[in-house]
Amino acid sequence: MSHATASTPQSRVLSGMRPTGALHLGHYHGALKNWVRLQAQYDCFYFVADWHALTTHYANREVIERNVYEMVIDWLAAGVDPEKATLFIQSRLPEHAELFTLLSMGTPLSWLERMPTYKDQMEKLKDRDLATYGFLGYPLLQAADILIYKAGFVPVGEDQAPHVEITREVARRFNHLYGREPDFEAQAQACLKKMSKADAKAIEAARKAFQEAGSETGLEQAMQLIEQCGALSANDRERLQGYVRGSGRAILPEPQALLTEVSKLPGLDGDKMSKSYGNTLAMREEPAEVERKIKRMPTDPQRVRRTDPGDPQRCPVWQFHKVYSSAETQAWVQQGCTSAGIGCLDCKQPVIEAVQKEQAVWRERAESYLANPKQIHWIMEVGTERAREVARETMREVRDAMGLSY
Ligand code: TRP
Ligand code: SF4
């Protein structure tokens, strides 16, 4: 467990999505649904990762251009609430690029070369030339995205977990290199003076016990005293916590991956749902298309005739039932399929209806935004300015720490 320092609003969540196409049900069930849930509990920052999209789609500007606001409409349709979450567009915040550049100075090439996504994607996306500087540096850009907001948690899929890990390493290295202010001890002492005598004494004792004997007993309590002291600013707290641990100031706190349980919805053919496999249902698919596509879904390959019993385990339609159907309907499928009591078209009907019902809500929400594009632009404008305040403040601290405030 990484400890939260006080200026880490550990309650901040950050995540981004690449605007490379219409979002589909895989995106919704794998990520977006979770975003909607998190916004009630955390200070969520969600952004359009358009620079990230360029690392693979640098020769397809029209794709990205077309999809930025379309993707935001999908977010809002799904229930992302701009009153609760801060929504913004990466390229509107050059601070991300500045931090990326500064972090790149001290990041070993090998850290980037060994990223599993690096070689995987190069092989998978054969039709693109990804032997580029931008593509190699992509995880570091992601680290900058995360660290600039001092996010405590990053909800990502499993494939992205190594990117959060490298972010932690980058942060650790940065804090090690630049977290030690020349007058660090004196500054920490000044902070202690702002506390009650008894608390300051307890903190000094805990520091000594921890640094000299590795004792964790007083540590937690000392951290709490610091956390709760109203006389300290966020920076004071961070400094003091670093003082107690002997680690210097954590200017860029280490985030944690938030691997929440998500319901896995496969594509129409049972493979991973992905636009490049042509097996998707878009979030705002026409109802008639939803029906047509689900009716054409392959089923248990061993159920050739209507009279053959089937096994839902071998059938992608069952995976949809697991996400969309009640226990009662699921029991009906199990019973009807294995006894050949129902046909596959019968079986698909409740799925068709459930998907259409879910999408009707999204479509309705999207309608109002589509009719009023200015509103979307305004939402992103407000969110971007809110993000800019945080990003600017972090960059001020980073420049100070690196000795760039001439
Ligand atoms: N790399 C992520 C993806 O491909 C998108 C992303 C960019 C991101 N920056 C991020 C996700 C920061 C979480 C946090 O899906
Ligand atoms: Fe699949 Fe349903 Fe047909 Fe069984 S009855 S094979 S679960 S579609």
Image (cartoon, rainbow, N blue to C red):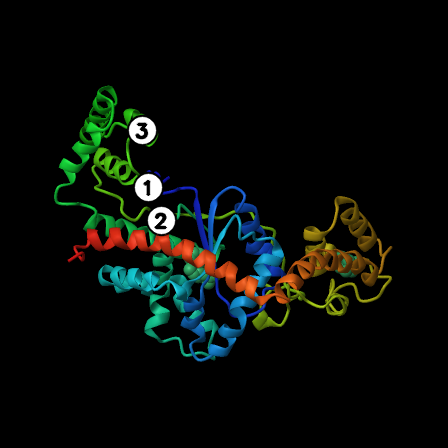
* Residue 343 shown left or right of residue 60 in the figure: right
Q: Is residue 217 visible?
A: yes
Cβ atoms at labels 3 and 2 below 8 Å apart: no
- For marks 1 and 3 on the same chain, the one whose residue lies earlier in the sequence: 1
Q: Nearer the viewer, residue 31 or 330?
A: 31
For mark 2, what is the residue?
150
Q: Is residue 194 above or below residue 246?
A: above
* Residue 340 shown left or right of residue 302 in the figure: right
Name the residue: 20% across, 50% down.
178
Q: Nearer the viewer, residue 333 or 230?
A: 230
Cβ atoms at labels 2 and 1 below 8 Å apart: yes
Which quarter of the rendering shows the N terminus? top left
Q: Mark 1 Cα within 10 Å, few/some/many (few <14, many 20+)?
A: some
Q: Amino acid at mark 3?
A: Cys
| Image coords of residue 299 (percent x, y) | 74, 64
Q: Nearer the viewer, residue 28 or 315?
A: 28
| Image coords of residue 271 (percent x, y) | 61, 64
For mark 3, what is the residue?
229
